[in-house]
Amino acid sequence: MFFTSTFITYAVIFFVTLFAALYLYFEKKHKYWQQRGVYSPEGPKFLLSHFSDVVFLKSTPAKWMKKFYDQINKDFFGLYIFGEPFLIVKDSQLIKRVLVKDFIYFADRFVAPGDHDPYHPYILFFQKGFPWKHNRASITPALTSGKLKSMFPLFVQASDSMVDYLEKNQVVLEAKELGARYATEAISLTSFGIKAFSFEPVDSAFTINRRKLFRVTPKNAFAQLLYLFKPDWVPILRPNFFDIEALDYFSSVFMESMKMRTTKNPLYSDLIDIAKELRNNGGTLDDKQFNGHAFQFFIAGYETTSATISFALYSFALYPHIQEAVRKECNEAIEKYGGLTYEAVHDLPYLDMCVNETLRMYPVIPFLQRVCVQDYKIPNSDCVIEKNTCLFIPMYALHMDEKYFPDPHKFDPERFRNRLDQSNSICFLPFGEGPRNCMGERMGRMSTKLALISIIRNFEVTKCSKTPVPVVFEPKTFVLQSNVGLPIKFSKLVK
């Protein structure tokens, strides 16, 4: 009895002491911004800090950042995530400095490299410093206008398969799944050198593994949070950002395509041919690095293309007059150029405006993050951003700021009519800006526009009883997607 009561006493003392120590530790951590004269809103001073709504899936990172963006009238302010200080940047001129003018101070992303994983360290998104710079430069030749033009027939092949699929399924369809099937087909042809058969009634191995790679689960949500917001825990907990079995499959497909292409030597003007060309010209990339580039093309191209197609179709269904204007422009351009050519796709200013407006309202990646790689004094202030501090640029909040985009919740492509030459201005950031912007922007835009042209010329899209108005975003992923999908009706046009 004495032993039991003594044990309980010591246990209580231990846990009280531990709690007090943790409280004092986080209390000190949460004075970081105050000591530097940077405004930070009141919030819980423990592990989750300001971030509890995201961790408990009550909010998406995009909506979470927008809440503070709207509440705080400062050029920049501090928040705490898992007890660590983060700087949120609102001022457009400071954003321009971070992304462009003073890029050397903010050259890396605040993301875990995932060194325990056999693939992540070779994917450009996760790389930092010299490896990122070297690998980005090595693959840039794959994305010139000439290369994209030579790949154009492969994208047309994917869009033709999509139209055939829609003609057999003129019913209510999930727009995101349609966009996903198209993106899978296009990327398999241009990056992996094979046909994915993503529009077949029975799922192919490529489609099955694509679903595994991008499925949304609480486990994946937790892994993404760690990689993006608490990367120093990743080496300890060792989560995987992507499904390893799926990456194993895509790696084997890519390497087999490389082997077959080397043996049979046809010319497809795709990533496989570009990889061969780099090797033949004395390039230094090995198989793992080429694999990493294939994954980068797939991961970035899939999310951007599928999401933008689905949200654009959703918007066309809600605004029939805009859909009709797009259809008219597409038909006129195709008549002008004698077919659905590369030149026709690039001579559609109104469709460009619609794509920009879709990317404004529904940016796939709703925030940008950078880490300070050397101490940086913010101009016209006393604040010094210390090395290893993470900065967030709340892209979704910027895009929905009526100061820059009046009536921001309205889908209005006309807002870009007088901004076509400024569509990459610092307050419109769907593909980032500066040296670390999305290098696949031109490919993504071309692929997206081709899909939309093929659909709108052949089908009318309308909302149905299950179409969500407005869209509520899924909290289990950091990318923007509807929590109930985007079901819309497709009806064949009578010509």
Image: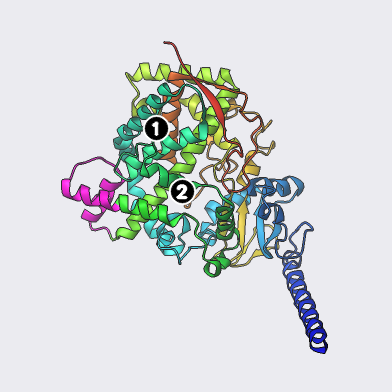
Residue 430 rendering spot, x and y as whole percentages = 54, 42
**In the displayed structure, would residue 104 be above or below residue 204?**
below
Most extreme residue toward the top is 495
Res. 201 mark = 1
**Amino acid type at mark 1:** Pro
Which stretch appears magenta?
255-283
Tell me, yes or no, if residue 369 can be seen here. yes
- 120 magenta-colored: no
Q: Main secondary structure of the magenta part?
A: helix
Residue designated by label 2 = 212
Q: CA distance from mark 1 to mark 2?
A: 18 Å
Give the mark count: 2
Looking at the rendered structure, the secondary structure element under dot 2 is: helix
Label 1: how many residues lie within 10 Å, few (<14), some (14-19) or many (20+)?
A: few
Label 2: how many residues lie within 10 Å, few (<14), some (14-19) or many (20+)?
A: some
Query: What residue is drawn where x is 58% and y is 25%?
Result: 414
Most extreme residue toward the left is 264
